[in-house]
């Protein structure tokens, strides 16, 4: 699914002072399972002075973080093999000073807010353009988005993601388990339980 906003990435040139806005370590990890978006965003961020590594799944994102925790990260909340929250949690453990930005394309802002609670500096709705992403990553820490008083728990966010995939698969347990890379019985147990708070 192509986003027209994304096609602007190649045409946007960084401001002359863009490099000065990146403090010290310019390593950036971009995690997104939309390959055209991932490629364009990586190119746009390289043009702005970042040293970009990419990943297309939660598993690959976690591997990259474990191998070389980046100073910056742009992580899609919803990935084919799970939630971007897992990558954020791993990054927070490996490099607490990293600046992670969450991209969310599926409407429930509360899930993105949970990511902020876990340590992300901000979240943007997809499609987001390169300038918005760059400014969110490089603005002063004091400007960090404030989480609400009662955000959803990480368990609730994961439960909601599972429910959405289940609905997308037309309530087919086997297909949902396959897409989530989860054992069928484990999924059935989760679906049988009440939503966590």
Image (cartoon, grey):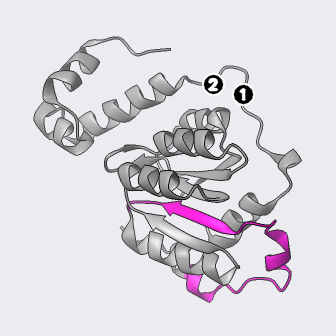
At label 2, counting other C-alpha atoms closer than 10 Å, the crowd grade (few under 14, some 14-19, many 20 or more) is some
Q: Compute the Cα span from label 1 to label 2.
A: 6 Å
Q: Which mark is residue 151?
A: 2
Q: Position of residue 100 (x, y in %)?
A: 64, 51
Residue contact between numbered discs 1 and 2, judged by CB atoms under 8 Å:
yes
Q: Please report the bounds of the magenta region as a residue range.
A: 8-33
Would you identify the image quadrant in which residue 50 lies?
A: bottom right
> Who is closer to the viewer here, 14 or 99?
99
Measuring 66% from the left and 59% from the top, which residue is drawn there?
72
Q: Which mark is residue 67?
A: none
Residue at which label 1 appears = 148
Q: Position of residue 173 (x, y in %)?
A: 15, 31
At label 1, counting other C-alpha atoms closer than 10 Å, the crowd grade (few under 14, some 14-19, many 20 or more) is few
Whether residue 127 is visible to the viewer of this picture, yes or no, is no
Measuring 50% from the left and 14% from the top, which residue is drawn there?
197
| Mark count | 2
Q: Quadrant of the N terminus?
A: bottom left
Residue 27 magenta-highlighted? yes
Q: Position of residue 15 (x, y in %)?
A: 80, 83
Q: Position of residue 104 (x, y in %)?
A: 52, 49
On screen, residue 182 above or below 75 = above
């Amino acid at each position: 699914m192509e986003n027209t906003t994304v096609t602007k990435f190649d045409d946007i040139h960084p401001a002359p002072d863009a490099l000065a806005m990146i403090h010290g370590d310019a390593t950036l990890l971009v995690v997104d399972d939309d390959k055209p978006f991932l490629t364009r965003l990586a190119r746009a961020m390289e043009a702005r002075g970042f040293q970009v590594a990419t990943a297309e799944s939660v598993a690959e994102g976690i591997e990259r973080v474990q191998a070389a925790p980046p100073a910056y990260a742009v992580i899609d909340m919803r990935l084919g093999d799970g939630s971007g929250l897992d990558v954020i949690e791993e990054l927070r453990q490996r490099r607490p000073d990293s600046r992670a930005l969450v991209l969310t394309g599926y409407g429930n802002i509360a899930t993105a807010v949970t990511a902020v609670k876990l340590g992300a500096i901000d979240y943007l709705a997809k499609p987001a353009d390169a300038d918005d992403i760059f400014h969110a990553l490089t603005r002063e820490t004091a400007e960090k988005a404030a989480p609400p008083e009662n955000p959803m728990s990480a368990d609730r966010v994961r439960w909601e993601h599972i429910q959405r995939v289940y609905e997308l698969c037309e309530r087919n347990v086997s297909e949902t388990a396959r897409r989530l890379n989860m054992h069928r019985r484990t999924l059935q147990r989760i679906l049988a339980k009440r939503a966590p708070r």
